[in-house]
Image: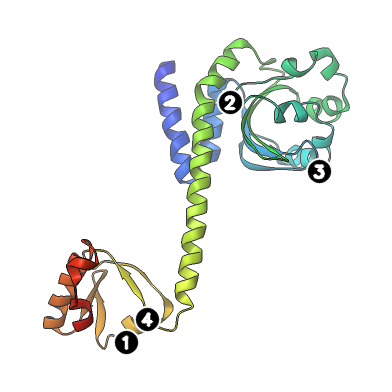
Amino acid sequence: MDQSEKLSELIGEIYDASLDASLWSDALGKAGRFVGGPAAAIYSKSPTAGIGHVYHQSGTDPYYRQLYFDKYVKLDPTTTAHYFADVEQPIAVADIMPYGEFLETRFYKEWAQPQGMVDSGSALLDKSVTSAALFSVFRYESDGVVDDEMRRRMRLIVPHIRRAVLIGRLIDLKSAEAASFADTLDGLSAGMVLVDAAGRIVHANLAGHVMLDAGDVLAVNSGRLVARDPAIDRTLQQLFASAGDGDAAIGTQGIAL
C-alpha cells in the first residue's frame, strides 16, 4: 500500500472514531506510526492551573502518563507555547527553545529521559480560556527528534483529527440532550409514545411502557404501535402517515379517534 492509500485509510478510521470512541486508541496508534512515532495521544492541559486530562491515547506508559499530570505538567517547558500555538500547526521542542537547553531541564531529566523520549510533534486542536487540547506524537531515541517529514505528515492528518474530535463532542452533547429529554418524559404520569410516520416506536416513557405492557387498547407489533381494534388501528395508522404533513393534514381526526 502506497502512502496515499495509507493516508486515505487512516482518515477513514479517524472519522470512524468520531462516531465510536472505542476506536480512538487504534486510530491514534496508526496515526502515530504514519507520522513517525510509536505513541500518540489527544489530551488537554492548562498553562495556569497545571492540570490536564488524556482523552484518548495509544502506546503511552500509564505510569509516566499519570506522573506527568500529577507533577511534571507544571515543569513542562512546552506547555505555555502549546497554548499559544496556531491551530493545526505542528510544533516541536526546537520551535520553542534551543534543544540543548531542553536537555538540561528537570522535565527532560526526570520524566522524558527515563522513558527514552527525546521529542514530540504536537498540534493545537482547540483551546478555552484556561486550557488547550492537543494531538501529540511522541518520539524516542530510536526515532530521533522531529524532522521536516514528520511535520509534513502531521499537517496531512491533523485537520481530520481536529474535525473528528469536534464531531465527537457534538454527538456527546446531543446524546446528553436526548438523555435529559427522555428523563423529562419519564417524569410524566401520562403514558406517552413517540412514533414515526410508519408507526414505529421511537421512544416511550415509563407510563407508556406500562400501558403497552398491559395491552388493553394499544400494543406493540414488530416495533410498531398498533390498536387492538382493527378499525381503530386502520385510522391510527392513517393518522401516523398524515402527521408527516403537519397538523393541517390531520384536522380533527386525532380528537375523534
Q: CA distance from mark 1 to mark 4?
A: 12 Å
- The residue sitting at 59% across, 16% down in the picture is 151
Label 2 SS: loop
Marks 3 & 1, CB-CB < 8 Å contact: no
Sequence-first disc among 1 and 4: 4
> Which of 7 and 170 lies nearest the eye of the viewer?
170
The furthest residue to the bottom: 216
Q: Quadrant of the N terminus?
A: top left
Sequence-first disc among 2 and 4: 2
Residue that mark 2 sits on? 88
Q: CA distance from mark 3 to mark 2?
A: 27 Å
Determine the image quadrant of residue 63: top right
- The residue sitting at 83% across, 36% down in the picture is 74
**Image position of 95 with respect to 67: above or below:** above
Nearer to us: label 1 or label 4: 4
- The residue sitting at 59% across, 20% down in the picture is 36
Mark 1 belongs to which amino acid?
A: Ala
At which x and y percent is residue 217? 24, 86
Q: CA distance from mark 3 to mark 1?
A: 56 Å
Q: Which mark is residue 70?
A: 3
Tell me: 111 left or right of 225.
right
At which x and y percent is residue 184? 49, 72
Label 1 SS: helix
Residue that mark 1 sits on? 214
Residue that mark 4 sits on? 191
Determine the image quadrant of residue 126: top right
